[in-house]
Amino acid sequence: MGNRIRWMLLVLAVAIMPNVSAFSQPAGGDVFREYMWYKEGGNAGGSLRVGGRVGYEGSIALEHDFDLEHATKAEVVVEKILCHDGTTGLAIQINDSDWIYIPEAAGIPAPQSAYQHHFYPRVRIPLSCLNHGKDNRFQMRVDTKHPWNWPQNLIYGVHFRIYYDPAKKPHPTGEITSPKSGDNLGRSATLTAAARSPNGKIRQVDYIGLYEDVNFEGDGIYRQWHYHFFHGQILNHIGSATDEPYNVTWDTSWAPDQRQETKIAARIIDSTGMVYVTEAVGDLGLVRPGLSVELCKPYDIPKTWVTRRGEKQELFDVAGDPSKAIAAQLVWSSWSPGYMKGVYINGKKVFDSEGGKYQYHAHRVTIDDIGCFKQGRNALKTGKTPKINGKMVHGMEVNWPGIMVLIQYRNDK
């Protein structure tokens, strides 16, 4: 069986199986608070090293004042980077709880520890392991068994999400007022919402969308509610607003063409930190006369994609007519891109470098040479990071699902 067929079967399996890492992803009508821990700075770009040899800081005291009144369930969201390939068994202990294992992403082939990744697993935790108020701590660990005796994950954040009974807990409410169900969205779409709270001022409205797009979430799922967090801040969502009527303009010029309906919802956050998720507005179309956008999904992703280990190559297919291409982007998530040495498509160098060393970076770069594509199968590779002053350096880690390619076409229809 070829690698391409194996990959297609994996995607199908992910689509029909329960996604344990997506437990209780907030849905319309949910009410919750998010208590977010993250490092302000320091080691490895502001991360917690979990593993052997260096930097594990042990039990961490949380400064948050946890509100458990009328709580119905709880979960933890972890900002996790694989870091050292072969690292397994990431787990968290909250206060005196049993160790709770953090699930791997079902969309990454097993063993997931062989593929560089940065994703955001969610796992349910017992409410009983939390204390009401400020007396809460956590610690994390990984399996000590490791092929080269240095297991290590980097953790950029740990979020404790507490859900409440909306009938008993005062909370913000609201709804999206534009667009309406059944509307078509053009290249520029204005989103608005009504929001109110018995607790006081509305602090922020975050718009999120369910549609197919690049997978910054790092779990290999392209159609999902697109957003994630880094150092406690929401990223790669449609946009946020802080003032009525909470307008956000969505530039869809790089959103891929959609085979299914698009849905939009909003996270309404009041001044007390209470969050309410609106019901989704669905059956939205994406209509952009004269423009078509193709998302080219990479496959045959190499294991241990770290550029110090040599040139690494993925494949992607182009379905459109390259002669009608007008622009293209490369999109990916990396760690330590300050050591990258170029990106090549079909043997042509199309991008050199960007980003810092020993830190996370989300790349979205426009490439000048759109003549590098060919219809059908294309090859993309990253250059090898050389030794510096005779010494091996880190190199760039390319995280799952690899480097994605977006192509804009002139659409004459």
Image: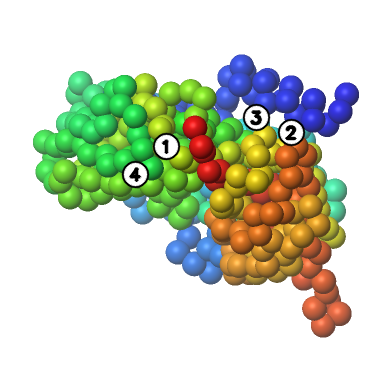
- Give the residue drawn at x 73%, y 25%: 8
- Specify few, some or many for label 1: CA neighbours under 10 Å numbering under 14, 14-19, or 20 or more: few
- Specify few, some or many for label 2: CA neighbours under 10 Å numbering under 14, 14-19, or 20 or more: some
Residues marked 4 and 1 touching at CB (< 8 Å): no
Q: Secondary structure at mark 2?
A: loop
- The residues bearing labels 4 and 1 have C-alpha atoms spaced at a distance of 12 Å
Which residue is identified by label 4? Answer: 188
Residue 289 - label: 1
- The residues bearing labels 3 and 2 have C-alpha atoms spaced at a distance of 7 Å
Mark 3 or 4: the one toward you: 4
50 displayed left or right of 315: left
Which residue is identified by label 3? Answer: 106
Q: Secondary structure at mark 3?
A: loop
Pointer 4 or 1: first along the chain:
4
Which residue is identified by label 2? Answer: 109
**Three-letter amino acid code at the position of disc 1:** Pro
Pointer 1 or 3: first along the chain:
3
